[in-house]
Amino acid sequence: MAETAHSEPLLTTPLHHVHVTMGGKMVGFAGYDMPVQYPLGILGEHNWTRENAGLFDVSHMGQSYIVSGDGSHETVARAVETMIPADILNLSLGQQRYSQLLNAEGGILDDLMVTRHADPANAGALILVVNAACKEQDYAHIAARLPAGVVLKRRDDQALLALQGPKAASVLAAHAPEVMEMPFMSARDALIEGVHAYVSRSGYTGEDGFEISVKADEAGRIWGALLADDRVKAIGLGARDSLRLEAGLCLYGHDIDTTTSPVEGALTWSIQKRRREEGGFPGAARIQKELREGTARLRVGIRPEGRQPAREGAEIMAGGRKIGIVTSGGFGPTVNGPVGMGYVETAFAAPGTPVTLLVRGKELPAQVAKLPFVPNRFYRGVK
Amino acid sequence: MTTKYTKDHEYIRVEGDVGIVGITDYAQQQLGDVVFVDLPAKGKKVAKGAEAAVVESVKAASEIYAPVSGEVVEVNGALEAAPATVNEDSAGAGWFLKLKLADKSELDGLMSEAEYEAYLKTIS
């Protein structure tokens, strides 16, 4: 059994001592000392989240506001739209979108969530949530490109919790009934245990759920109040990874990076019609061309036959040659088998296409698969 | 019968000139839920310290090294259908493979149970 040691000092979240007390197995992730699992273990935590409600500390992620001195949403939206390909201008109050920070070549510098603040008193404020490993570069990149009068305010004073799973809504509504009917990808203020929280109905597990932003010194209280509900268990990064992989969601630095465009990454759905037509984002010429003509490679799901997982870096073969590479791979507890994603030449991207995966010198039979592996269960409102 | 241990947390339980190789309880705890074990072909010759098998947890793949040199004479086929046996009974039903020892004197370089217990205290 090989192990690797980490020696550089790690940052901690406001809940670090809670994870240690709960028996969390702490590992270095994106510069933070984070729980990869609790005593329940990754399989148990994964399945608990799919069946009940899982509570995650995601305070390592970067929260910031973009605000304009003139209080105008249009000013802020147009500034941010020069860096990302999503339609921000037409966000309604409290509406949230997934997007990507792009470099001049249309490669992905990071993926992020952008929310227009729900409170009219905060009109003109956008809330960004970016990946922990990228946040310093992201903030520098964004700040350097904002026009005069528009500023990025780091919200390092805020913790971020995620409550995910089919029982998340009823658990959180027991504290804050106003969250029950929030549609997926919307945000609002809420009071939880008398604590002011900014809640969005989103997450990264494919399940219904919420992300809850609270002041760092209130995080322990909210964490404890939610965990006191016997439908809730604490979930570590290990299960977060298997949940997002089954849900077909990208992990930055693995499934997408500066060498991949949003079109190659099968994220075209996150570029709204107005932006596709108008452009005006970095790499627009390349991305508009890719939208018209397609790309040479595409991100797809990969389903190995049998029980053996193929990990990141495994080569994808067809007709005796390499046609792609696995970018995330592991075991999907809900699928009860190995799952992965990766890039293949577009001619091989149709679901059901037989391929083989090179794992430790052996060819493992697999198929290109439709994503997600487990159907999303987002809450779209009362039908 | 004698059981010896490596610093990489493999054990070898020697009966005559055959050793049963597996991972220790500490190792299975560190790995977490085992979902697949990639076992070598019967008849394969492995050198001491070379990769003998790969154990896959939900999170990662980890190499299992041969504690001593030898020839694989049997593998635990039951792990294919029930890989979690490695978690449940690593010292017993969760064994990986049986090695016909090439050089019994190589065992002298491994730790006894008491030495391994002491070693665990130094790393945790």
Image (cartoon, coloured by chain):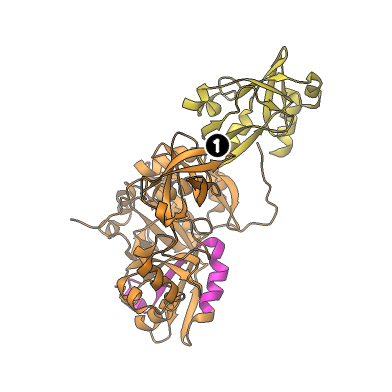
Chain colours: A orange, B yellow
Instruction: Give A33 or A341, whichever is nearer the viewer.
Output: A341
Residue at the left extreme, as displayed: A383
Q: Which residues are magenta?
A: A117-143
Which residue is the extreme one toward the front?
A: A319
Between residue A302 and residue A198, name the one nearer to us: A302
Q: Find disc 1 in the rendering and name its residue.
A: B56
Mark 1 element type: strand
Q: Position of residue A182 (x, y in %)?
A: 28, 60
What's the residue at 29%, 58% (across, down)? A179
Q: Estimate the x, y position of residue A166 in percent, counting from the top left.
A: 32, 47
Q: Residues within 10 Å of mark 1 (few under 14, many from 20)?
A: many
Q: Quadrant of residue A112?
A: bottom left
Which corner quadrant holds the C terminus of chain A?
A: bottom left
Under mark 1, the amino acid is Glu
Locate residue B103 relative to residue A82 in the image: left or right: right
Q: Is residue A21 above or below residue A77?
A: above
Q: Going by the image, does A291 lie left or right of A33?
A: left
